[in-house]
Amino acid sequence: MHENKTASKQAARRPKQWSSTQSRISVLNEEFPDAKTLLISSKRPKAFLVRTARELLAGGTEVLILSALGDAMPLGVHLQVALESTKAATVIRIETTYNLTSSHKKDPSYTPGLRIFMKKHPEFKGSRISPGYVSFCDSSLVPTPLYDLDSFTNDKFCSLIRSSSFKLTDVPEFTKFFSPSEVNMYFNVFTALFDKAIKAVNEETKAVTTDNLTVKHPNIKLGLCRASPEIGKPDSIHGSCFVVILKENYPLDKINNVAFALTIPPDPSKYSNADDYLEALTKLGDNLMTTLCDYNGYAKREVNKSLPRITICRIPPFESASNLNVTKLDVAKAVLSGLATGYRHGPSPRLNFSYDDDSYKTAWIETTNLPVYESRS
């Protein structure tokens, strides 16, 4: 009884403006249940807000509400114009608000505000990945080498390796950096780490590390694995992704070549139609990007901070499937789509795509309509 009286007193003290604001929010939630609200702050640069808005739209948001108060209102209008002029979104309507910021009885204060409702433009193309995080190797060296001797000197570089198994015998450009005994030891670690990941796959645990793993490798500082039970059977190695941080013996004797990543792509011969194969590649891209982000997050949380952050990862081309009429461009689009799904601004490394008849670059341009940055191989 006492609680009911207290609640009634609190409700009585609430200003009418508070009640009307809450009612308006409820109405908006009913009208646009899946809308996302972007709060505009005058302390944020316009470029940041444009990128964030485009990432939200690229991530599936159909209705975006730009909300600005006080001195942020002009910035909200500038953002609206920027999104309209680039055919990212169109205006549904604009509302002005009058928000109670101080409920002092004798001297209440209000702040004007603005809500701009925008709908994704039907011709919108974009990506959750910022264009500054993507670069493409040119054709000066074909095939693009796994590691560069001179490039990326200020970055902690990781190169992705595709293999049909954990033995890595089908990746001669990688195994040339290590002795046969070292490569065999990598196989043992990958097998044990994958078994650990399969046992741990659930909603709470997605990635596992070599911590407390009985199988060791003298050149591994840390290994991390994410299985992908969505691709193939629950215990299938296809779609699984690894990140390995090297302790020493860096490729090309460059200390910046701190890591390599390994993935086991889906086998196109196991698929009866193109859609299923491309969907598997999209899931692989998602899992790969998530694995890279998980590692960088792990490195940031590490107590003694001895693990390097991977700042750039080179992505090689994946196999097309002539038996399914799947082209290099189809494959590149599927992989890019998956990478964009797993992308998290902050922990994600920059992506550098190997040259493959410009399939990645063409896929990026056709699907996102965003700028292209080239790098020397």
Image (cartoon, rainbow, N blue to C red):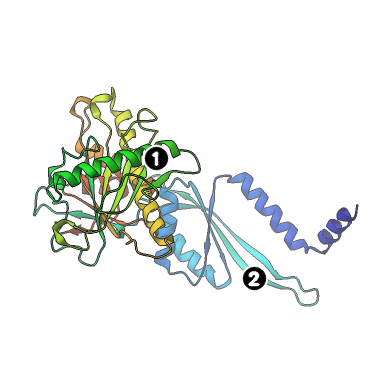
From the viewer's perspective, is the residue at label 1 or at label 2 nearer?
1
Viewer-proximal residue, 346 or 308? 308
- Residue toward you, 376 or 186: 186
Disc 2: CA contacts within 10 A as few (<14), some (14-19) or many (>=20): few
**First of labels 1, 2 by sequence position:** 2
Residue 65 visible in the picture: yes
User: In the picture shown, does residue 280 fall above or below 83?
Assistant: above
Q: Position of residue 274 (x, y in %)?
A: 28, 28
* Count of numbered marks: 2
Residue situated furthest right in the rendering:
1
- The residue at which mark 1 appears reads as 197
Q: Residue furthest top?
A: 272
Q: Quadrant of residue 349?
A: bottom left
Q: Is residue 105 left or right of residue 272?
A: right
Q: Quick check: 138 left or right of 293?
A: left
- x and y percentages locating residue 131 in the rendered image: 31, 57
Residue shown at 83%/56% (left/top)? 7
The amino acid type, in three-letter code, at marker 2 is: Thr
| Residue type, label 1 | Ala
Residue located at (30% from left, 45% from top): 336
Q: Against 89, is 169 above or below?
A: above
